[in-house]
Structure formats: C-alpha cells, structure tokens
Image (cartoon, grey):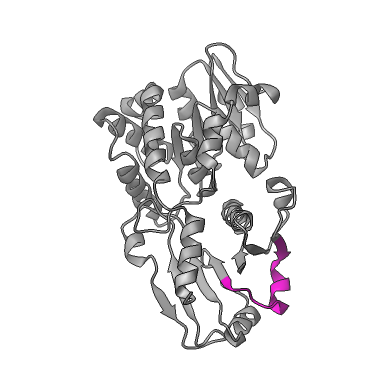
Amino acid sequence: MPTWDIFCRVIDNYGDLGVCLRLARDLAQRGDRARLWCDDLSPLAWMQPAPVERLSCRPWHDSESAAPGDVVIETFGCELPAPFVAAMAARPARPVWINLEYLSAEGYVERSHGLKSPQFSGPGAGLDKWFFYPGFTERTGGLLRERGLIDSVEAHDGAAWLGARGWAPEPGERVLSLFAYPHAPLDELVQALGPGWRLLLCPGAPQTALPPLLRAGQRATALPALTQADYDRLLWSCDLNLVRGEDSFVRAQWAGRPMLWQIYFQDDGAHGSKLEAFLDQSLADAPTSLRSNWAALSRAWNRLGPWTAEAAQALRELPAAASHAAAWRAKLSGQLDLTAALQAFARRAGGA
C-alpha cells in the first residue's frame, strides 16, 4: 500500500485544491494512503466535510519536518518545500517525483507527457522529476474519473434531487447551473437564452450581478457552497451547465450534459488557443451545424468572438448538444482514468 504526498497551493481560486482533493480521495478509496499538503485547507470545510479513510489533509508548513512517502505529486508547478525535497533525496528508496500539470488539449501535451527532468543541483540533486499531463487522448494521462462514476450518473434522479432542495423547475422550464468568473458576459447570456429558464447560481460574483439582468420568463436562485459530491449531482441534474477553470470543467464532461466552459483568462491570450484546441477535439465528431454553432457560443462566452446568430442558435439546439455530450463522454470513459494512469506510471518509474 504506497503512500502518496500531494502538494497544492491555493492561488486565486479553489480549482487547484478541488483537483488535488479529488485525486487524493480517489487514491485513498482505491486502497492507497494519501496525504494532501496545502497552504489553505479552509475550503475543505465545504468541499469535503466528512473524513475519508486513508486520506489526511495537512498544513503545507508541516511538510518541512515530514518523512516523504513513496510517490510525491507536485501539482501545477507549486514548488515543493526545500526541506521536504532534501528528505526525498536522502530517503534510501527514493520516491517517484511527479509534476502534475494543468489540463489542456493542445498538441504539446502528448509530446511532453511522461518526460523526465533529472535534478543536478539544489536539495533534490540526484532525483528525477517526471512531467505528467492530463488530457483527452490515449497518449496523455487521462482525466480524473472515480470507479463507478458513470453508473452513478446514469442512476441519478435529477428531478427528485432538485426537488428535495427546492430548486425544481416549473413545468416547461429548463434548468441551468452557472459557475463563472466575474468578467463573464452575463447580460449577453440571458439575452441569448430567452424565456423558460431557471438559473442556479453557484457562489461568486454572478450571484449578485446576474439577477438584475434577467429577462421575462427567467428566474435565478443563489446556491450555497456545495460539497464536491453535491456539486457533481447538480451537474447531473441540469439541462445546461456553465463551468469554469479545470475541476468543474472535467466534472461537467462526466455529467454528459451540454456544457459551456469559461476558460481561465490569461493576459498573454494563451487561453484562446487552449479553448480552440479543446473545441477541435471535443466537437470533431459533432454534426457540422452543431460544431459551428457551439464553437461560436464558446468563443462569445469567453469574449473571444461576437454574440452572433450562430452563438444564439446553439442554445436552441440542446437536444442535439445533449446527444453529442453523451457520445463525447462515452469516448472519454473508454480511456484509462488519471488515477489509474498515475498509479501505473509510478510503478514503472519506481522500477516495480
């Protein structure tokens, strides 16, 4: 039973911690031991309030005096504490050191996945660091997907779940979940949606910014902070999910429902090519009109294109979008999941 050390720093949002928590929990639920080291553990009060067997969550600074485990995951280039790296180098059986990178569909991911970086200086001299890239193809590390996840989605009664929480739609009304950054074009969105929508707003700036923008036949509900498990169920229950960053982005794809991704904005414009790479992969097998309209909507939502008639038309084609979302999920679920890929990679890198 190997021990995994997973390091995470919270920068400006909690998506990084969300990814790390899901990975640590999945490792623990598969029988390994996992320690999650983070510089801000406070979000766990709502993300994961119940303890998980074989998973411990610890303050970042406590790692400086800890004995390293068998596998060390440095997530998103967070830079491990120097004392911990020195302890890794001093360990008789040196741990496998993996830098888990951000998710992308861009071509460099396949070229860079699994590359080794020998450490020639500093506290980790003599160690090897391996670069591990999540992705959407067999030549990447895959996506986080717990065992039995798709079966759980299929067995979920979305109407009953929403109703039990007072979030059920009225007859003829559709339900949308919205998790967005403050700069999202909310006014353009509600205009394009038209009537007949109940918008469930996750915590964040849109909870106050969006309600004054509602059109006739639309209503909005501000949601409380949800556990990761309940957020997943929210995605499974909605007709359309608007998500942001990485963690909710992946979970929306497993929901198998139409999904609109607000990518993390970068000043140098790198988010544009990242979005286009994902659209190219995820819409490759979609009907021509759906591919064109949904790409136009995705660009408009990310302020990378205008709100054209095509963008608005995409929101009138939800049945076709739902069919394609289910097909895309089926394609992804045929690949090895990220946790299993990491476990297999760690065994190979460690000489097992």
Kindly give the residue lying farthest to the left in the view shown: 288
Q: Is residue 183 visible?
A: no
Task: Report whether 214 appears left or right of 315.
Answer: right
State yes or no: residue 61 in magenta.
Answer: yes
Question: Which residue: 47% across, 28% down?
Answer: 189
Q: Is residue 20 above or below residue 72?
A: above
Query: Does residue 228 appear left or right of residue 145 in this picture?
Result: right
Q: Position of residue 109 (x, y in %)?
A: 36, 60
Residue 163 point in image, percent of width and height: 66, 21
* Residue 218 falls within the magenta-colored stretch: no
Q: Nearer the viewer, residue 160 or 259?
A: 160
Location of the N terminus by quadrant is bottom right
Count of numbered tags: 0
> Residue visible at 57% across and 71% down?
72
145 lies above or below 344: above
Residue 211, percent from left and from top: 61, 26
Seen from the viewer's position, the closer of residues 278 and 190 is 278
Q: Nearer the viewer, residue 339 or 171?
A: 339
Task: Name which quarter of the figure residue 78 lies in.
Answer: bottom right
How far from the left and from the top, in percent, is residue 129? 47, 76
Up the image or down, 288 lies above or below 69; here it is above
**What stretch of residues is rendered in magenta?**
56-71
In the image: residue 37, left or right of residue 150: right
Residue at the image point whose x is 37% and y is 39% from the top:
328
Quick check: 67 left or right of 334? right
Would you say residue 9 is visible in this rendering?
A: yes
